[in-house]
Amino acid sequence: MNQIDKINKDLEPIRLKAKRNSTILISLFVIDVLLMLSAIPTGLGTLGFIIPMFIVTVIAAFALRGPEKEYKSKAKYALSDYLFKPEFENYTFDPNGQFDSHLSRELSLHPLGDSFTSNDLITGTLQGINFIRADVTTTTTTTDSKGNSTTVTNFRGQVFAFDFFKNTNSYVKISDNRSGMGGVRRKLSAKKITFEDSEFNSTFKIHSNSDHEAFYVFTPQFMRRLMDFHKQIQYPMNLIIHNSTLYLSVYSNRDSFEPKIRKPMDEIFIASVKQDINIIHTIVEELDLKNTLFK
């Protein structure tokens, strides 16, 4: 039995209880909907039963969520200890920790909305390079003239920050040309620029408030390594160099650390979690962030 099988076995009673409670809640919700639909042709006579039933459903939603929260919390800590902790020094994991929303907005790190949520904050050190990693989701909710609300996801993925090996003060951003992630706040005074590498220019939009520093940071070797990394992850991405820090946002459209209660954690889920580990290793090692020549 491997470690993941052991974790699944230990957590299975809690998962099954959470799954059962979820089924109960779905059943109550379906009953509420059916009662409301049946009340439409018959008038308001059945509201005396519908309203109490709706209240029961709301109370049940709070009362029955305990096992789900317990399962997800224990699963996250188990995965953190098994997959992440052995890989890094000075490792910490906080399932309620958040990436700095103010920093995300100030740097135009990823598409923003009117709602920002973040969790599963990880910090650590790899080969002397400090890093931060968190899940982030941003959404925008609009309401039409009839009062109908629509929520659109602007960004759902992972955000990272790494120590950078060159001393920088200005702002340089590259964003995937195939995505809508290329906006830059006006206060950053960044303008669109191009490099001599035509393939790089066709793959990324580049914005900077200092041409000199952009060319200082994005050497031909560094650009080639970024191109290789971009092909490897196969997700839309933004990368920003600012104040000797490398920031990365990856629009993976997933919450890496969020196990589902409908089935035990499988190889596909574990692979998605490991992808974040691979990103951290690739950024530090393949982009050569441990290089101290320019410090």
Image: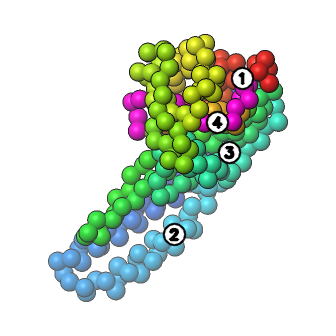
Q: Which mark is residue 289?
A: 1
Quarter holding the C terminus is top right
Q: In terms of depth relative to the viewer, which is nearer, 51 or 199?
A: 199
Q: Position of residue 263 (x, y in %)?
A: 52, 41
Q: Amino acid at mark 2?
A: Ala
Q: Mark 4 highlights which residue?
A: 170
Q: Position of residue 71 (x, y in %)?
A: 63, 50
Q: Nearer the viewer, mark 4 or mark 3?
A: 4
Q: Which residues are magenta?
A: 164-180
Marks 4/1: CA–CA distance: 18 Å
Residue 214 shows in this picture: yes
Q: Which mark is residue 121?
A: 3
Q: Amino acid at mark 3?
A: Leu
Q: What's the magenta bit mostly, secondary-structure-wise?
A: loop
Is 148 included in the stretch rendered in magenta?
no
Q: Mark 2 highlights which residue?
A: 60
Marks 4/2: CA–CA distance: 53 Å
Q: Is residue 293 above or below residue 239?
A: above
